[in-house]
Image (cartoon, rainbow, N blue to C red):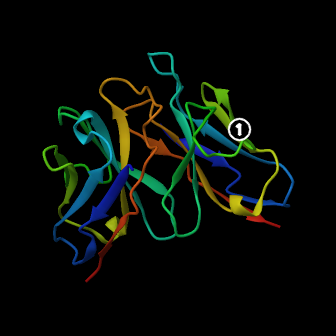
Amino acid sequence: VVMTQSPLSLPVTLGQPASISCRSTESLVHSDGNTYLNWFQQRPGQSPRRLLYKVSNRDSGVPDRFSGSGSGTDFTLKISRVEAEDIGIYYCMQNTHWLVSFGQGTKLEIK
Amino acid sequence: QVQLVESGGGVVQPGRSLRLSCAVSGFTFSSYTMYWVRQAPGKGLEWVATLSEDETTKYYADSVKGRCTVSRDNSKNTLFLDMNSLRPDDTAVYYCARGDPWFGGQGDVAFDVWGQGTMVAVSS
């Protein structure tokens, strides 16, 4: 399953919203009814951090300005108001299928 | 607290072998699927391998299939990645990450915890 993110670079003004798209070549709906689509943030020099799991569930400690939506093959990560600490690269990842796959990454930078 | 610590990276010549380790603490390692993920310098994340809690299920990325073997020692809370016939394009930071437990989780846990990574550089 190929995951395609857009845009690959996202310049944003502080306080403004941001949105990242992630599309898969196959449906991410598992036979158990769940959709195993996750979003990760990777800040410079750090390990990836999971932000959202199963499309829209926020991990503990993740600010509520981060939200996820979508279904099937089309998903979106939204940041309602970008803050300076949000700088980094964002990846979508599917583990619905046994062969896990990541998107190419979207670099969020401040204008 | 839950912690994953990778080790075993280094500089190695093309064609040689290397064993990476991931020492786990803070949870019942023997109950969880585990993953290896790598990141080449300046590049994105690439899934490498998956190993079930009882080693009955293993999956590999096409880029490493036939050259890498994932295994675990549940008595020592350690995950391994044996890499053979190393190539320059295997140069990357290698991370281990926790998966879901056999008794459930259903995606709630998978990839929630990552190690700090260990760097592998393949160069002559």
Q: Position of residue B100 (x, y in %)?
A: 37, 33
Q: Quadrant of the C terminus of chain A?
A: bottom right
Badge 1: chain ID:
A
Rendered position, A39 above or below B89:
above
Q: Please name whichever residue, A64 or B21, is drawn nearer the observer in this view of the structure.
A: A64
Residue drawn at x 44%, y 16% as measured from the top left: A31
Q: Residue furthest bottom?
A: B124
Q: Is residue B61 visible?
A: no
Residue at the image position 43 percent from the left and 66 percent from the top: B40
User: In this rendering, would B2 be left or right of B84?
Assistant: right
Return the x and y of residue B94 as percentages of the image width and height. Answer: 35, 61
Residue type beneath disc 1: Ser
- Badge 1: how crowded within 10 Å, few (<14), some, or many (20+)? many
- In this rendering, the answer to whether A91 lies above or below B89 is above
Which residue appears farthest toward the front when viewing the image? Answer: B1
The answer to whether residue B56 is left or right of residue A1 is left
Q: Quadrant of residue A13?
A: bottom right
| Element class at badge 1 | strand
Task: Classify residue A22 by image quadrant.
Answer: top right
Pick the residue in front: B16 or B82: B82
Estimate the x, y position of residue B60 in percent, counting from the top left.
Answer: 29, 44
Q: Report if residue B13 is visible in the image.
A: yes
Count of all numbered marks drawn on residues in the image: 1
Residue bearing mark 1: A67
